[in-house]
Amino acid sequence: MQTYVLLHGAWHTGRELTSVAAMIGSAGHQVFTPTIKGNGPGDARTIGLPEAIASIVDFLIAHDLEDIVLVGHSYGGMIITGVADRVGDRIRRLVYWNAFVPNDGESVFDMLPSELSEAFSAAAAEREDGAVVLPFPIWREALINDADLDTARRAYDCLNPQPLKTLTDKISLSANPERMSVAKSYINCTEDISLPHHYPWHPRLSRKLGFFRLIQVPGSHELCFSNPPLLAQAIIQAGRD
């Protein structure tokens, strides 16, 4: 039995990963799906990246979790990298699922095409809370292009505003991921166009891990909604010894 901790991406909470967690659990594993600070429905939208990372460090310590497979989706890659830098002795393997892989001093915005970071900043400027919200047409076409319309709408209804600072804050690391001794995997959904294919998740970001296991599966950025069984299988493959 392995212990998995699944971390969601931007706009999500841990609740959106419960169906995937149940499928991993049915294979005999223990699974947790915490919500990163700043992403809960009642959380302040002024939360920054250090507070978000600290919330998951605190979760692991509070639940006395060790020897874990820590999975991060998209923005969650920032969180698992920061957590590994702080409590790496608790982690068996890091799994990046179409996730950002930061080096010291990098932010999510540093790894986005300039047109996307500019669009996110403009969207946040229009809101009183300074958070980022995606319009449904962008969500539908760029993030969940492999699902039917009803699934896409149900998924969109789950989303929360994303604190802008979690995307603009630069991470502080004592070692870049390539230099971390923990084992690493990268799950790449091959139809993911949330980042354009000329500016891809893999291998542009995955190569920053150094030596890693690659798992590739068909699907969009939001495979947790469009094909949870396939995602659960990919996570188990990525997390195996």
Image (cartoon, rainbow, N blue to C red):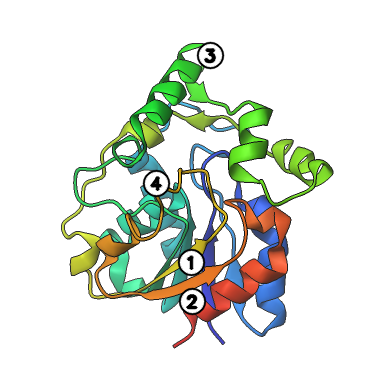
Q: Estimate the x, y position of residue 65 in percent, counting from the top left.
A: 46, 72
Q: Which residue is mark 3?
A: 127
The residues tagged by marks 3 and 1 sit, at their Cα atoms, a distance apart of 34 Å
The residues tagged by marks 4 and 3 sit, at their Cα atoms, a distance apart of 31 Å
Q: Which residue is mark 1?
A: 187
| Pointer 1 or 2: first along the chain | 1
- Residue contact at pointers 1 and 2, CB within 8 angstroms: yes
Residue kind at label 3, given as amino acid type: Arg
The answer to which of 172 and 202 lies nearer the viewer is 202
Q: Residues within 10 Å of mark 1 (few under 14, many from 20)?
A: many
Which of discs 3 and 1 lies nearer the camera? The answer is: 1
Quadrant into which the C terminus falls: bottom left
Quadrant into which the N terminus falls: bottom right
| Pointer 4 or 1: first along the chain | 1
- Residue at 53% in and 46% down: 193
| Pointer 3 or 1: first along the chain | 3
Label of residue 22 in the image? none
Residue kind at label 4, given as amino acid type: His
Q: Residues within 10 Å of mark 2 (few under 14, many from 20)?
A: many
Q: Estimate the x, y position of residue 6 in percent, counting from the top left.
A: 54, 62
Q: Is 135 on the left or on the right of 102, as rendered?
A: right
| Pointer 3 or 2: first along the chain | 3
Instruction: Say above or below: 106 vs 61.
Output: above
- Residue contact at pointers 4 and 3, CB within 8 angstroms: no
Q: Which residue is mark 4?
A: 198
Residue kind at label 1, given as amino acid type: Ile
Q: Residues within 10 Å of mark 3 (few under 14, many from 20)?
A: few
The answer to which of 81 and 234 lies nearer the viewer is 234
Q: Which residue is mark 2?
A: 238
The residues tagged by marks 4 and 1 sit, at their Cα atoms, a distance apart of 18 Å
Q: Estimate the x, y position of residue 118 in percent, counting from the top left.
A: 39, 22
